[in-house]
């Protein structure tokens, strides 16, 4: 079964922000590379969305609705609903994310 992939507005903005940061602080070539790798990682969810694991921040408080996969150092947080996968966040895993995840996903 193939799942439909949807990006939440926050996830689209995350990807844009990552691209822009790398473009201006590193190089356009590296920005394009990271963008393509994030896109490929997300696209693979259409085949195997269950391969993700619970984000540790939610596992601690027993919330099982979200999964995550990685394109290091980026964390891709998503939900599966029937035949749909909704990507909610693409965040730099080197940051402290607990408060941000709670604000964005548990509002």
Image (tube, grey):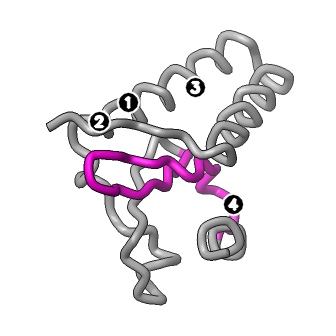
Relative to 51, does residue 99 appear above or below in the rendering? Answer: below
Q: Position of residue 22 (x, y in %)?
A: 75, 27
Residues at discs 1 and 2 in contact (Cβ within 8 Å) = yes
Q: Quadrant of the C terminus?
A: bottom right
Q: Which of 75/45 is in front?
A: 45
* Residue that carries the numbered disc 2 in the rendered image: 46
Judge depth for marks 1 and 3 and give the one in front: 1
Mark 4 crowdedness (10 Å alpha carbons): few <14, some 14-19, many ≥20: few
Give the dominant element type of the magenta stretch: helix, strand or loop. Answer: strand
Please report the residue visible at 40 percent of the width from the left and 71 percent of the height from the top: 65
Q: CA gap, disc 3 to disc 4? A: 18 Å
* Residue that carries the numbered disc 4 in the rendered image: 95
> Regarding mark 3 in the picture, which secondary structure is present there?
helix
Q: CA gap, disc 3 to disc 2? A: 20 Å
Q: Position of residue 41 (x, y in %)?
A: 40, 34
Q: Residue furthest front?
A: 82
């Amino acid at each position: 079964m193939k799942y439909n992939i949807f990006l939440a507005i926050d996830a689209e903005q995350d990807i844009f922000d990552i691209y822009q940061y790398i473009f201006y602080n590193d190089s356009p070539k590296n920005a394009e590379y990271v963008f393509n790798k994030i896109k490929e990682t997300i696209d693979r969810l259409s085949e195997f969305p269950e391969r993700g694991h619970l984000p540790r921040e939610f596992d601690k408080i027993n919330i099982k609705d979200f999964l995550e996969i990685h394109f290091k150092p980026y964390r891709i947080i998503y939900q599966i609903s029937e035949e749909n996968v909704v990507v909610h966040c693409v965040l730099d895993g080197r940051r402290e994310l607990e408060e941000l995840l709670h604000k964005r996903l548990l509002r």
